[in-house]
Amino acid sequence: MKTIAVSEKAYTRLASWKAGRDDTFSAVIERLIPPKGTLAAALEAAASLPELPAREFESLEKAVNATRRKLRPAWK
């Protein structure tokens, strides 16, 4: 068992991922954060994430596309 300090904002975000009263912060972290350096673990963790609502998916897609447009000229 270890004690860590996180900001209030980080605590709120972490708490929002808890699946219920019996879910622990350790379980949330183990569920969401794959072991460092393994693509297989990252893909497994991504597969276990809940599906994004359409509105959030569209927002994320717009942000990714905007970033791609900014990067393309830099690579020419």
Image (cartoon, rainbow, N blue to C red):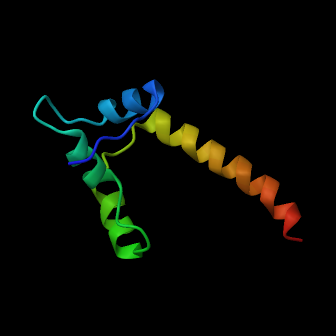
> Is 35 above or below relative to 55?
below
- On the picture, is 1 further left or further right than 39? left
> Is 9 above or below relative to 70?
above
- On the picture, is 67 further left or further right than 50? right
Residue in the image at 38% along x and 66% along y: 42
Q: Quadrant of residue 63?
A: top right
Residue 33 image offset from top left, x and y in percent: 35, 55
Residue in the image at 81% along x and 63% along y: 72
Which residue is situated farthest in the front direction here?
Answer: 2
> Depth check: 48 or 41 in front?
41
Q: Count the labels in the image.
A: 0
Could you tell me which quadrant the C terminus lies in? bottom right
Residue 35 image offset from top left, x and y in percent: 35, 66
Residue in the image at 72% along x and 47% along y: 66
> Is 22 above or below relative to 65?
above
Which residue is situated farthest in the left direction here?
Answer: 22
Q: Quadrant of residue 43?
A: bottom left
> Depth check: 8 or 3 in front?
3
Residue 73 image offset from top left, x and y in percent: 88, 62
